[in-house]
Image (spheres, rainbow, N blue to C red):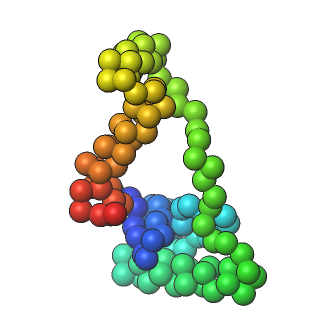
Amino acid sequence: MNDIIQHKDYYATVHFSSEDEVFYGKILGINDLVTFEGQSVKELKKSFKEAIEDYLETCKELNKTPEKTYKGSFNVRVSPQLHRETAFVALKTNVTLNDFVKSAIGFAIKHTNIIGLGANGK
């Protein structure tokens, strides 16, 4: 089960509250907190699309970039054994550890069909 929906190039998580009997979600990868909800899947999707359009319009009016800025670096914690093995493979293939990890991430994205990306996506 994939609890992520897409509209244009925007994604959101989707959850269900049995207590409130409502589907709800939060838009991912943007600079602000934008949520939406609906009592049916159809209503949830409509609410999500409206939330995206409203958010984009508001950003345009405020001359603000809606997308979250990613700086291109992050820390990854792995076991010492995996770190060692990865370093050796990088050495054996004559690439830096950083380039090896970038290639591995690119390969995983290309071969994973999650949230519209991967083999059939971008």
x and y percentages locating residue 90 in the rendered image = 38, 23
Q: Nearer the viewer, residue 43 or 21?
A: 43
Which x, y percent locates residue 77? 52, 26
Asked if residue 26 is positioned above or below residue 85 in the image, the reply reads below
Q: Is residue 68 visible?
A: yes
Q: Does residue 23 appear in the picture of this structure?
A: no
Would residue 109 be found to the left or right of residue 102 on screen? Answer: left
Quarter containing the C terminus: bottom left
In the rendered structure, the answer to whether residue 116 lies left or right of residue 44 reads left
Instruction: Please say if 61 is above or below 9.
Output: below
Identify the residue shown where x is 48% and y is 31%: 98
Residue 5, picture quadrant: bottom left
The residue lying toward the viewer, choosing from 72 and 40, is 72
89 with respect to 19 (left or right): left
**Relative to 65, residue 19 above or below:** above
Residue at the right extreme of this rendering: 62
Which residue occupies 60% across, 53% down? 70
Residue plotted at (62% across, 61% down): 68
Number of callouts in the render?
A: 0
The percent coordinates of residue 82 (x first, y second) are: 40, 18
51 to 95, vertically: above or below = below
Question: Could you tell me residue 74's position as x and y percent?
Answer: 58, 38
Query: Which image quarter is the N terminus in?
Result: bottom left
Q: Nearer the viewer, residue 87 or 16?
A: 87
Looking at the image, residue 13 sits to the left or right of residue 88; the answer is right
The residue located at (42%, 13%) in the rendering is 84
